[in-house]
Image (cartoon, grey):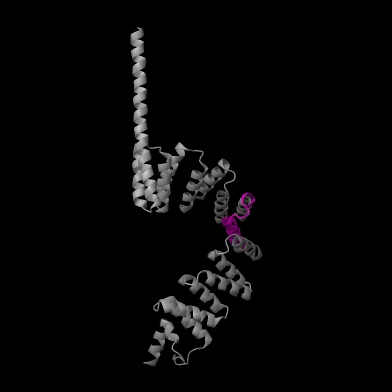
Amino acid sequence: MMKTTFYLVSLHVAVIAVNIYASSIVSDHAQTYFMQGAINEHHGKSADAITNYQQAIQYDSYHFESLYNLARQLHKQGNVDEAITYYETALKAHATCAQLHYDLGLVFIDKEAYDQTIYHLQRAIELYPRFTRAYVQLGNVLQKQGDGDKALQQYYKALEIAPHHIDTHIALEQLWYQQGVYNKAILHLQKSLNIQPHNIDALLHLAHILQMHNQEEEAIQTYAKILSLEPDDTAIILIVASNLKNLGKLDEAIALYQKVLEHNPEHEEAHIGLGFTHLIKGNFKQNGESNEHYTLSHYPAMHSSNNMQTR
């Protein structure tokens, strides 16, 4: 009897050992594929990374790191439904991961499933009460739903945790701007620029608000700063040129349009802008001919119309 019992116990131990060994092999394979996926992701090989993460999951269906990274990659590629599936599977493995709830909440924003977004962002905050970005995103969603007061509460909670969090100041600036409270919008823009003095988007918006409120000199100074930071960015140059034209700084606008055309003589937007600027300045004669080489021919539509009139 003792020999039989000993044999059964030994067999049971052996089975456990085999299962542990097999499980270890499976886990090693999953980890190997995960590591390869992480390397491919680091080198920008997204498709290969996705394949590696999927291979890892084939060995271990609840390999958390692979599920999470696969979901992130799929979300980046716009595969929202697949991303949600893998995020939700990852949650089964780690239901108390605040970052996971946060990321899943962001995916639901793309589907405009705001109730689910709010649930996951609130859950992220419950799990990690100092999750600044979660407060900001929750405020953004509440603002989209038209609840500006509740959005403000979330933004100010974020500022209590991180007074110099730039995304919070930008969110507050946009909220106040939409509500027409421009002095507060400017205040938060300036605070965001104190944190990131070279933030081009913030500078452009500040210049726009200043321009709207007839603070022309301040707007022009801000545009000059933008150009000093991005002297060769065509899109920025065209934005600034258009606004300087609207401010009556016609010579400065012309110089900027010409700068674009020096690098790209066929740039249509620059031709149109330059044509309109010369039209405002009066650099044309009644028959459409110009006193100089930079005529209305910069504006193809006008040039065509003029040719039709002279036939």
Residue beneath the point at 55% across and 49% down: 134
Is 129 within the magenta?
no
Front-lying residue, 232 or 211: 232
Q: Is residue 136 above or below residue 290?
A: above
Is residue 179 in view from this perspective?
Answer: no
Front-lying residue, 61 or 115: 61
Residue beneath the point at 59% across and 45% down: 130
**In the shown orientation, is residue 169 left or right of residue 233?**
right
Q: Is residue 300 above or below residue 176?
A: below
- The stretch of residues the image draws in magenta is 159-176
Quarter of the view holding residue 124? top right
Residue beneath the point at 61% across and 61% down: 194
**In the shown orientation, is residue 85 left or right of residue 136?**
left
Quarter of the view holding residue 304? bottom left
- Secondary structure that dominates the magenta span: helix
Is 163 within the magenta?
yes
Quarter of the view holding residue 164? bottom right
Front-lying residue, 270 or 237: 237
x then y, percent, for residue 142 = 57, 53
